[in-house]
Image: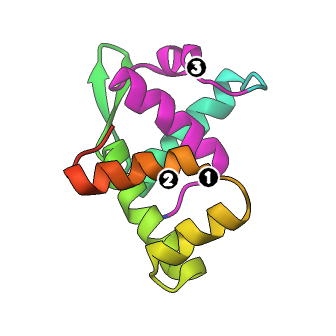
Amino acid sequence: MEKLTIQEEEAMRAIWETEGGFIRDILANLKSSEEMPYTTLASTVRNLEKKGYVKAVKAGNAKRYEPIISALEYKAKFMNGFVGNYFHNSYKDMVSFFIKEERLSSAELEEILDMIKNNKTT
């Protein structure tokens, strides 16, 4: 699975959120601060198709794009790579880093510990 560019990730988030759609539907669901031109998005979605993230389904004269890879699959793949590359496969070191950088509060850490103890997610 190939890493996506920022623009491709934005498009994929819109596709995952809508569970697929036509380019105009995807464009309407983009959460970017800058408006992306229709043609740029169409090109981005074609790249996603080439990379195997979406499939095009013919609907009349248009194509509807549907996700092949789920958001969860993507997150799992790249979080594992992130932790491996930056924290030597140690989630403990990753959490420690965020605590030291004051990006994780004690309340959030307690919540994480509770999730671990109860083996559940939010």
Q: Is residue 117 above or below residue 43?
A: below
Q: Position of residue 121 (x, y in %)?
A: 29, 43
Q: Is residue 97 magenta?
A: no
Mark number displayed over residue 27: 3
- Amino acid type at mark 1: Leu
Could you tell me how far apart the alpha carbons at marks 1 and 3 are, in whole angstroms?
33 Å
Q: Viewer-proximal residue, 86 or 46?
A: 86
Q: Is residue 33 left or right of residue 119?
A: right
Q: Is residue 118 above or below residue 57?
A: below
Contact flag, marks 2 and 1 (Cβ < 8 Å)? yes
Which sits earlier in the primary sequence, circle 2 or circle 3? 3
Mark number displayed over residue 4: none
Q: Quadrant of the rendered structure where residue 94 is?
A: bottom right
Q: Residue at x 43, y 53 (%)?
A: 50
Q: Which residue is mark 1?
A: 104
Q: Residue at x 53, y 44 (%)?
A: 107
- Amino acid type at mark 3: Leu
Q: Viewer-proximal residue, 76 or 18?
A: 76
Q: Position of residue 86 (x, y in %)?
A: 60, 78
Q: Is residue 95 above or below residue 11?
A: below
Q: Which residue is mark 2?
A: 109
Q: Residue at x 64, y 62 (%)?
A: 99
Which sits earlier in the primary sequence, circle 2 or circle 1? 1
Is residue 32 visible in the rendered image? The answer is yes
Which region is colored magenta? Answer: 3-32
Q: Viewer-proximal residue, 49 or 25?
A: 25
Q: Is residue 13 magenta?
A: yes
How many marks overall? 3
Q: Viewer-proximal residue, 32 or 79?
A: 79
Q: Position of residue 32 (x, y in %)?
A: 69, 28
From the image, state whether disc 2 or disc 3 is nearer to you: 2
